[in-house]
Image: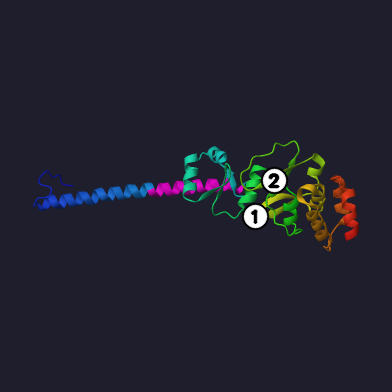
Amino acid sequence: MPVFSVKFFGKNENCIFAANNFAVDFCGVMFYNALHINTNGAQMRSETRKIIATIAQKHYGAFTAREIEQAGISKRALYNFKACGEVVAISRGVFQLADNRFSPDYSAIRMRIPEGVICLISALYHHNLTTEIPRYIEVAIPRNRPVPTIDYPPVKIYRFSDVPFSAGIEQMEIGAVVVNIYSPEKTIADCFKYRNKIGIDTAVEGLRNYLSRPNAKPAEVFRMAKICRVEKVIKPYMDSLL
């Protein structure tokens, strides 16, 4: 490009031509650099999102800030995703990608209380044994386990002794999340054990609905009642409903 030192806005056509060429070249370089930076930024963001999605997949869509940091992603990057609406906080320190298919409630429970078991009215509800809608997600944990602090979802924790805690655990998919839940038979026995907390009417409704099913197993209900030490309480109700 010609070097010019004469009047920039003068009548010298060569000068004007050189100045225009300079402007075109300068803008072209700026545009290339901006495009290069934006392309690299988009690639980095895409790669970061893939890493987050891989981590989240291990916990039914949920992940913690600590896991993200351990993967080499800064907290700043995580909160940038959150500010853009691509990541949502579902509980204290627990996050989820906004476009995932997993229930935020049960993803948070799996993350914060991995050994917990859905019990009592919550279990009755998911087994279609009650018309009552639970106000909390009721979760059983081993008696010697510290009660976890969880701000969301609304959770009510029950501490079970070893044998009753271990008996009758099944798995169920709720909102695309596989959770631990007590079997219908164990749930009914637990409801009679905690009848003073949840109400005897709820326990009886669950038993009545269960026994009305063609595949009901009264002997299994009674076996679970023995484990929960409520066989004498439940027997009169079973005798009147059978």
Residue under numbered circle 1:
176
Residues drawn in magenta: 38-57
Q: Position of residue 69 (x, y in %)?
A: 53, 38
Q: Position of residue 71 (x, y in %)?
A: 54, 40
Q: Tell me the residue at 14%/52% (across/down).
A: 16
Residue 7 visible in image: yes
What is the three-letter code of the residue carrying label 2?
Lys
Q: Position of residue 14 (x, y in %)?
A: 12, 51
Colouring scheme applied when the structure was drawn: rainbow
Label 1 with label 2: CB-CB less than 8 Å = no
Q: Nearer the viewer, residue 114 or 90?
A: 90
**Quick one: which residue is furthest to the left in this view?**
11
- Residue 56 inside the magenta-drawn segment: yes
Quarter-wise, where is residue 99 in the image?
bottom right
- Residue 110 inside the magenta-drawn segment: no
Q: Which disc is residue 156 wearing?
A: 2
